[in-house]
Image (cartoon, grey):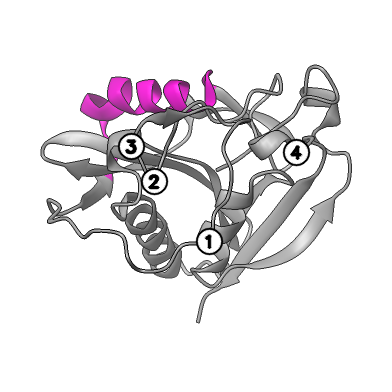
């Protein structure tokens, strides 16, 4: 869940009430309880992405970020060249997470889930897999970053034990066009927020 360039937020969110697609800038946060209906969902299988997954993973990133590049950790990164894990549901790629190893940490560069499977645990399964991979690789931390407007991402990671460790003011302004472009819920996109989880 990193910031993309050109000021366009992730392209597709699904409304929790009606199920229709919601535009990123028009989406709103809402307080809800556990009253939502429960559905029997197929199991989520997470695996390292291989050559047969490349097209589906790239299509999912492009649908989510509207291009094959994201701004993460102060860099413009091409998603097709990064290692990734995919979540498989009913034989389809339901989610993809791109990452890289930097020093003693694994960095989550981008995370995208098919809107059909949003709120089905796909993102959580992908992050848990990367955390397991980090432990196996003897990395001490998993680090992610997002933009200041991306409240859903901050909610998602903090619920999973991630803590805000750094805010880089104005880091995204060179990549956002126009510079005042609204992000989630109309919040101006300006700063990069870095969050991390220390692994035991």
* Residue under label 2: 16
Among numbered discs 1 and 4, the one appearing first in the sequence: 1
Viewer-proximal residue among 39 and 108: 39
Which residue shows up at 52% across the image and 75% down it?
Answer: 199
In depth, the one of 191 and 135 nearer the eye is 191
Name the image quarter holding residue 106: bottom right
Whichever of labels 3 and 1 marks the residue nearer the N terminus, that label is: 3
Residue 101 in view (yes/no): no
The tag earlier along the polypeptide, 2 or 4, is 2
Measuring from the top left, give residue 153's x and y in whole percent: 57, 51
Q: Is residue 167 above or below residue 69?
A: below
Looking at this view, is 89 or 24 the one in front? 24
Alpha carbons under labels 1 and 4: distance apart:
18 Å
In the picture, which quadrant includes the N terminus?
Answer: top right
Q: Earlier in the sequence, mark 4 or mark 3?
A: 3
Residue wearing tag 3: 19
Q: Position of residue 177 (x, y in %)?
A: 78, 17
Q: Which residues are magenta?
A: 48-68
Give neighbour class at mark 2: few <14, some 14-19, many 20+ (Cα, 10 Å).
some
Image check: 91 left or right of 105? left
Going by the picture, which residue comes out furthest to the bottom?
Answer: 200
- The residue indicated by pointer 4 is 187
Image height of 182 relative to 150, above or below: above
Disc 2 secondary structure class:
loop
Q: What is the crowding at mark 4: few (fewer than 14 residues within 10 Å), some, or many (at least 20)?
A: some
Which of the numbered marks, if any, corresponds to residue 31? 1
Secondary structure under the numbered disc 4 in the rendered image:
loop
Q: Is residue 134 above or below residue 48?
A: below
Distance CA(mark 1)–CA(mark 2): 11 Å
Residue drawn at (36%, 30%), measured in percent from left and top?
20
How far is disc 3 from disc 1 in space, using C-alphas? 17 Å
């Amino acid at each position: 869940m990193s910031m993309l360039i050109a000021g366009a937020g992730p392209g597709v969110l699904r409304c929790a009430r009606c199920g229709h697609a919601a535009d990123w800038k028009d989406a709103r946060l809402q307080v809800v309880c556990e009253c939502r209906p429960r559905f029997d969902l197929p199991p989520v299988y997470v695996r390292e992405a291989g050559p047969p997954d490349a097209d589906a993973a790239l299509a999912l990133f492009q649908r989510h970020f509207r291009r094959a590049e994201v701004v993460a950790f102060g860099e413009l990164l091409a998603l097709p060249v990064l290692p990734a894990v995919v979540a498989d549901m009913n034989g389809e790629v339901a989610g993809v997470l791109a990452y890289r190893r930097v020093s003693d940490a694994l960095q989550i560069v981008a995370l995208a889930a098919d809107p059909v499977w949003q709120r089905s645990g796909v993102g959580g399964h992908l992050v848990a897999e990367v955390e397991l991979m980090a432990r196996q690789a003897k990395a001490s931390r998993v680090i992610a970053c997002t933009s200041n407007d991306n409240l859903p991402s901050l909610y998602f990671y903090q619920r999973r034990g991630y803590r805000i460790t750094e805010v880089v003011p104005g880091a995204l302004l060179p990549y956002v066009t126009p510079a005042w472009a609204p992000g989630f819920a109309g919040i101006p996109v300006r700063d990069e927020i870095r969050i991390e989880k220390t692994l035991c």
